[in-house]
Amino acid sequence: MPLRIGDVAPDFQANTTEGPISFHEWIGDDWAILFSHPKDFTPVCTTELGYLAGLKAEFDNRNCKLIGLSIDSVDDHNAWAKDIEETQGHALNYPLIGDPELAVAKLYDMIHPNASGSAKERTAVDNATIRSVFIIGPDKLVKLMLTYPMSTGRNFDEVLRVLDSIQLTAKHKVATPVNWKQGEDVIIVPAVSDDEAKEKFPDGWEAPKPYIRIVPQPK
């Protein structure tokens, strides 16, 4: 079945560069970002893994764990990690899942369920759709899904921005407008009546239209 936002993120057991994990147990009470790659030793993915390693402290501050996946063995991942550190200036500081049999890729609907063959027999083009990002909440529900083409490096600053929005709106009955960044004004969601909004936002709001109620970001 296709995976959708709001679904339970499929649980799985796998080997990683930091040892075996059970995914839901590994997440625990934190948030998590799972992001996937079609092949080791590919140029765009090399830049992504290095950049995210440099950004990891920002995700740590938001109680969000990072975990990557690539369609090769853990041994290949460990060899690739040396190239990542050498060329990108950041060593891997989060686990990278080995998925040589495509098991997790199929579980997360990133590749056709009938795809077959071992990792070494498959090329990055064969695995082109395995270029996804999933944000998963402490409740183990999928909060965000993004899939990128192989030729386009992912914007992990944007993923961090989305995480800020999701975490904020999980606590408060607000939504974030276009291009919102941390600290900027937000919008009261339509499900909140004006009477309830007066209780939650006693200082009032700006309303260019009755359905657009703008307030400062809640603390």
Image (tube, rainbow, N blue to C red):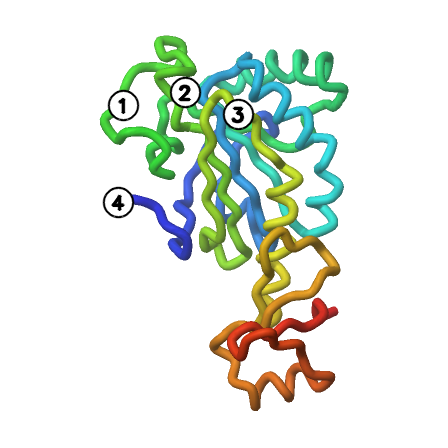
| Nearest to viewer (mark 3 / mark 2) | 3
Q: Which residue is mark 4?
A: 1
| Nearest to viewer (mark 4 / mark 3) | 3
Residue 119 percent location from the top left of the image = 39, 15
Residue 186 percent location from the top left of the image = 64, 66
Residue 73 versus residue 129 in the image, above or below: above
* 83 sits to left or right of 194: right
- What residue is drawn where x is 66% and y is 17%? 84
Q: CA distance from mark 1 to mark 3?
A: 23 Å
| Nearest to viewer (mark 2 / mark 4) | 4
Indicate which disc, 2 or 4, sits on the residue closer to the N terminus: 4
Q: Amino acid at mark 2?
A: Pro
Q: Which residue is mark 2?
A: 100
Query: Which residue in the rendered view is the most extreme toward the front?
Result: 208
Q: CA distance from mark 4 to mark 3?
A: 27 Å
| Nearest to viewer (mark 1 / mark 3) | 3
Query: Which residue in the rendered view is the most extreme toward the bottom?
Result: 195
* 8 sits to left or right of 76: left
Q: Which residue is mark 1?
A: 115
Q: Which residue is mark 3?
A: 152
Indicate which disc, 4 or 3, sits on the residue closer to the N terminus: 4
Indicate which disc, 1 or 3, sits on the residue closer to the N terminus: 1
- What residue is drawn where x is 61% and y is 57%? 165
- What residue is drawn where x is 57% and y is 14%? 43
Q: Quadrant of the C terminus?
A: bottom right
